[in-house]
Image (cartoon, rainbow, N blue to C red):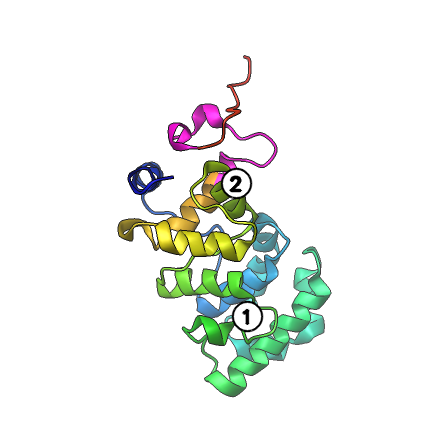
Amino acid sequence: MNKADTFEFFRRLADDNPDPQTELEFGNTYQLLVAVVLSAQATDVGVNKATRALFREVKTPQQMVDLGEDGLKQHVRTIGLFNAKAKNVIALSEILVRDFGGEVPADRDVLTTLPGVGRKTANVVMNCAFGAETFAVDTHIFRVGNRTGLARGKTPLAVEKQLEKKVPAPFRVGAHHWLILHGRYVCKARRPECWRCVVADLCAFKPKTPAPAK
């Protein structure tokens, strides 16, 4: 996809959704971090159901430490891999209390040193909490990037690097939200809904899917 088409691609997505936001629910940066850690290999809907009661009780790393691993598990047991995730959340909370005064550091490299926090998680936190121009490549973005020709790569990091290079300035902060939402609701894995896609004519995907028969 050339530079002009890339600009037009994001212009249309932005016109369709001027203020894209993560679908994870949170009240502060620490809760966002916890929610993103819990969301690995889980849906945002499932995480939100589990964290609503949790986040009414826990708003700071110290409160999470006080809740304890067993207490946390009671809240998140409906989420996949909840045992390992609960262990990581308690461990990262202890580190935030001990080393960062209970604050979430606004540094991607530092964030990735926390238990359970990979590059994708750190990118989400940096973007959503601190407004950084980061691109958190999940399965949706990986698929959309490769399928459309916007950002092709064999690994999430390769797609991320392509996005860093190609996404134009007006759209860089919102880009990963637009791509995630587009992949989640329009450019779906099994059957992309090309008939209602606002960027279909810019997309390299040849076997466009027709509208279902009424």
Determine crowd level at label 1: few under 14, some 14-19, many 20+ residues with C-alpha closer than 10 A. Answer: some
- Number of the label disc, if any, that sits on residue 81: none
Tell me where residue 94 appears, x and y as whole percent: 58, 81
Magenta-colored stretch includes residue 80: no
Name above or below for residue 87 compared with residue 169.
Answer: below
Q: Secondary structure at mark 2?
A: helix
Disc 2/disc 1 C-alpha distance (Å)? 29 Å
Camera-side residue of 178 and 150: 150
Camera-side residue of 148 and 117: 148
Q: Quadrant of residue 80?
A: bottom right
Q: Quadrant of residue 126?
A: bottom left
Q: Which residue is painted at 48% across and 76% down in the image?
A: 110
Q: Give left or right: position of 98 versus 132.
A: right
Residue that label 2 marks: 184
Q: Is residue 24 visible?
A: no
Q: Which residue is painted at 51% across and 66% down in the image?
A: 33
Tell me where residue 114 appears, x and y as whole percent: 56, 75
Q: Which residues are magenta?
A: 183-203
Q: Residue furthest bottom?
A: 98
Q: Which residue is painted at 53% across and 76% down in the image?
A: 61
Camera-side residue of 133 and 43: 133
Name which residue type carries label 1: Val
Name which residue type carries label 2: Arg
Q: Is residue 187 visible?
A: yes
- Dividing the image into 4 quarters, which one contains the N terminus? top left
Residue that label 1 marks: 58
Question: From the viewer's perspective, is the residue at label 2 or at label 1 nearer?
Answer: 2
